Amino acid sequence: MKRRKRGIESLKRRYGIMFVAPWVLGIVLFVIIPIFTTFIYSISNVVIGPAGPEAHIVGFSHYYSYLVKNATFVDQLVASLTSIFTSLPIIISLSLILALILNQEFKGRMLMRGIFFLPVIISSGVVMSVLNGGTATDISSTLSAGTSSVYSQSLNFTEILARLNLPTEANELMQNYLADTFNLIWSCGVQTLLFIAGLQTIPDQLYEVGKVEGATAWESFWFITIPMLSRVLLLVLFYTMVELFVENSVFVNKILEDMRWHNIYDTTSARLWMYFAGVGIVIGIVMLLYKKLVLKRVG
């Protein structure tokens, strides 16, 4: 019996390795090797030869050039990294509020959930290109420019704010905030669905016990809902940060445009490495705030 059991365990192990092997191979070929290649490009002068890109290592001169000699790059880098501290709280809060509303029992609940998920489909590159009046040849430019703000352009905030007779500086500031808020609302679809899925896993008995103990709705939210959503909240945080830092980043899209269409591999790789180093620092700060503000409250 022991030999038979060992044989079954060995067979399960081999099956497990067979299933994992394609994933490991894909990670090596399409993640690890490209990452290593971009680092080599970032410390080299790359020339396009007959056999493809040829790298001639020159050290960290590209990093020094952008960080020390190019003040514009540093300002753009800081602005792109710090913008998440205004966008992330709005997206998380709004998504959670929408999820709490859509998780209630009312007629047409499934229809409303579908409506709130429509922005995820509409904001795709192909659909936005069609909405912009573009053709199939314009799709690549739409993708490189990020999600378009057609939905914000449909409302003319300039005319609305002009009627308030505000100073020019305040008018421009309010216009930017309104446009950004409208765009952030548009990008809450996936986060709302994740929160709804998390809310549906919370047992109703917990809220019933809270009512018996005299807890208010606000106390139930902070001491039942938030602790039970801590794992989902962490998932939503990471998903939103990746979306903001990569998919919707004008800074990254401009670098990728130089790499794809202008065949510039050395300086673009250096800029991307500096950007993602900054992204790692910002993610560390966000995780520290999450630990102090959420996990300690849960504990």
Image (cartoon, rainbow, N blue to C red):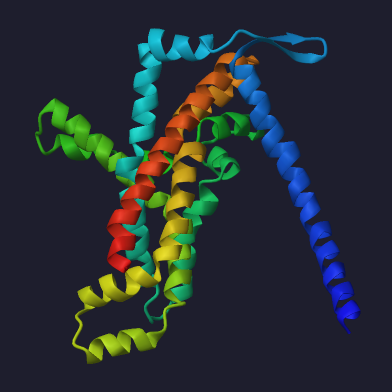
Give the percent coordinates (x, y) of residue 216.
19, 80
Q: Residue at x 44, y 49 (%)?
A: 240
- Above-or-below relation of 51 to 156: above
Q: Position of residue 79 (x, y in %)?
A: 34, 28
Quadrant for residue 231, please give it: bottom left
Q: Position of residue 171 (x, y in %)?
A: 17, 32
Left or right side of 240 for 292? left
Q: Is residue 60 visible?
A: yes
Quadrant where the N terminus is found in the figure: bottom right
Q: Residue drawn 61% across and 34% down?
A: 139
Query: Percent x, y for residue 70?
Result: 40, 10
Q: Is residue 198 left or right of 10 when viewed as pictured?
A: left
The residue closer to the viewer here, 250 or 178, is 250
Instruction: Say which residue appears at 35% left-offset and 42% top-offset.
Output: 285
Residue 269 horizontal side relative to residue 161, left or right: right
229 to 244, vertically: above or below: below
Residue at the spot x=51%, y=39% of the render? 247
Name the image quarter holding the C terminus.
bottom left
Image: 298 above or below 75: below
Nearest the viewer among 169 and 36 is 36
Side (left or right) of 23 relative to 224? right
Q: Image quarter for residue 5?
A: bottom right
Q: Is residue 155 visible?
A: no
Q: How many marks?
A: 0
